[in-house]
Image (cartoon, helix red, strand yellow):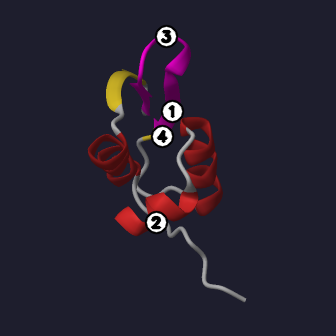
Amino acid sequence: MSPPLLRKISGMQCVKLLCKHFGFQVVRQHGSHLILSKGAGTERKGTVVPNHRELKVGTLKGVLEMAGVDEEEFSKCQ
């Protein structure tokens, strides 16, 4: 069995990686959730990242799926 690609990280670490390596920008914040976006028009991608001390791997997978970011690419940036 191969080792897991993703590990637990904080919400802020996730935001920093998405912004630095994948071109996202923080658009706004609603409570403890940060809304990120990139692109324009029909090419627009977005995701919501909970600003928690630790994101569970399942939550991180959901964030990356919504953002259209490959788990393997993201894990290389960690």
In this rendering, position of residue 48 left or right of residue 22: right
Q: Quadrant of residue 42?
A: top right
Is most of the magenta stretch helix, strand or loop?
strand
Q: To which residue does mark 2 refer?
A: 75
- Circle 1 — which element? strand
Vertical side of 47 occupied by 16: above or below: below
Quadrant holding the N terminus:
bottom right
Q: Position of residue 39 (x, y in %)?
A: 41, 22
Q: Which of the two marks, 1 or 4, is nearer to us in this view?
A: 1
Q: To which residue does mark 4 refer?
A: 50
In this rendering, position of residue 68 left or right of residue 19: right
Q: Position of residue 37 (x, y in %)?
A: 42, 25
Q: To which residue does mark 3 refer?
A: 41
Pointer 2 local density, CA inside 10 Å: few below 14, some 14–19, many at least 20: few
Query: Is the Cβ of the residue at disc 2 closer than 8 Å to that at disc 4?
Result: no
In this rendering, position of residue 19 left or right of residue 65: left
Residue drawn at x 51%, y 21% is 43
Task: Confirm whether residue 78 shows in the render.
Answer: no
Q: To which residue does mark 1 refer?
A: 48
Magenta segment boundaries in residue numbering: 33-49
